[in-house]
């Protein structure tokens, strides 16, 4: 499995100095989520819904840090939400997790547990190095199951072929499908690297257990 170099653009660090990324690569088998994984997802939904004030999860420090970063980078966080906040809003509204496949479901589960955005990419469709930077004027891509996303001001991941993922929504170009054999998952924190080890280990455990994850490698970038 090829090693992918992931770096953070100095301009992002200038505006959001605590930015840190946790990168995980793994060989996986993409299939339907087994019952125990669906059970874990259901448990997280219940834990949030049974809180005295479920909407309080939307004010968690991690979610607030993403909103603050979006403002600093020039994107309206009320119009463009971080992916973790979008998932949490679904759960608070009683819609639950989307059920896609075991690999995507693991990433969404860890995103909800950590309250942090997580990008997920099919390594076969990632070319060259990956840079975490701010979207430029005129840049767009087709988001997964969405319209073309206006990337200007959005914190995003770009490889040598251009932008392919963001803290809001990933692109169709590098999305995980039934044919995917190896993945790159990136947890985005705008509040420093604390706890990123914990969440990459959690992701490793779940991918190994539910998606035949092998050759797992983890790296923290800051």
Image (cartoon, helix red, strand yellow):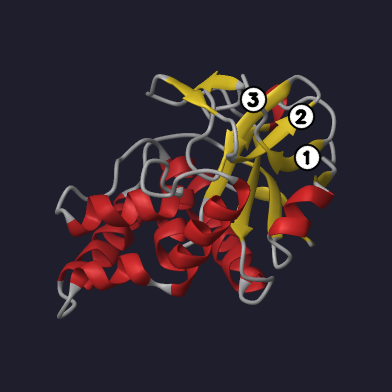
| Image quadrant where one finds the C terminus | bottom right
Of the two numbered discs 2 and 1 on the same chain, state the one appearing first in sequence.
1
| Image quadrant where one finds the N terminus | top right
| Residue at (85, 43) in percent of width and height | 5
Which class describes the residues within 10 Å of circle 1: few (<14), some (14-19), or many (20+)?
some
Query: Residue 138, relative to residue 184: is it above or below?
Result: above
Judging depth in this view, the residue of 122 and 133 nearest the camera is: 133
- Distance from Cα at disc 2 to Cα at disc 1: 6 Å
Q: Residue furthest bottom?
A: 52
x and y percentages locating residue 152 in the rendered image: 59, 31
x and y percentages locating residue 213 in the rendered image: 61, 48
- Distance from Cα at disc 3 to Cα at disc 1: 17 Å
Of the two numbered discs 3 and 2 on the same chain, state the one appearing first in sequence.
3
| Residue at (60, 38) in percent of width and height | 153
| Residue at (24, 50) in percent of width and height | 90
Residue 137 numbered tag = 3
x and y percentages locating residue 39 in the rendered image: 27, 59
Q: Secondary structure at mark 2?
A: strand
Q: Are marks 2 and 1 in contact (CB under 8 Å)?
A: yes
Left or right: 56 in relation to 115: left
Residue 131 numbered tag = 1
Label 2 sits on residue: 159
């Amino acid at each position: 499995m090829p090693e992918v170099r992931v770096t953070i653009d100095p301009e992002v660090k200038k505006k959001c100095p605590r930015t840190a990324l946790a990168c995980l690569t793994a060989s996986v088998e993409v299939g339907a989520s087994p019952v125990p994984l669906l059970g874990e997802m259901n448990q997280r939904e219940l834990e949030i819904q049974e809180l005295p004030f479920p909407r309080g999860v939307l004010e968690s420090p991690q979610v607030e840090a993403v909103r603050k970063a979006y403002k600093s980078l020039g994107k309206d966080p009320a119009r463009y939400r971080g992916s973790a906040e979008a998932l949490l809003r679904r759960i608070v509204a009683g819609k639950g997790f989307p059920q896609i496949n075991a690999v995507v479901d693991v990433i969404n589960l860890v995103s909800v547990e950590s309250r942090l955005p997580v990008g997920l990419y099919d390594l076969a469709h990632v070319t060259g190095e990956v840079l975490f930077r701010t979207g430029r004027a005129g840049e767009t891509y087709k988001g997964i199951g969405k319209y073309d996303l206006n990337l200007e001001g959005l914190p995003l991941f770009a490889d040598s072929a251009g932008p392919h993922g963001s803290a809001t929504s990933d692109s169709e170009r590098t999305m995980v499908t039934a044919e995917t054999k190896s993945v790159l998952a990136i947890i985005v924190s705008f509040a420093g690297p604390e706890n990123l080890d914990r969440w990459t280990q959690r992701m490793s455990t779940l991918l190994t257990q539910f998606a035949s994850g092998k050759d797992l490698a983890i790296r923290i970038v800051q």
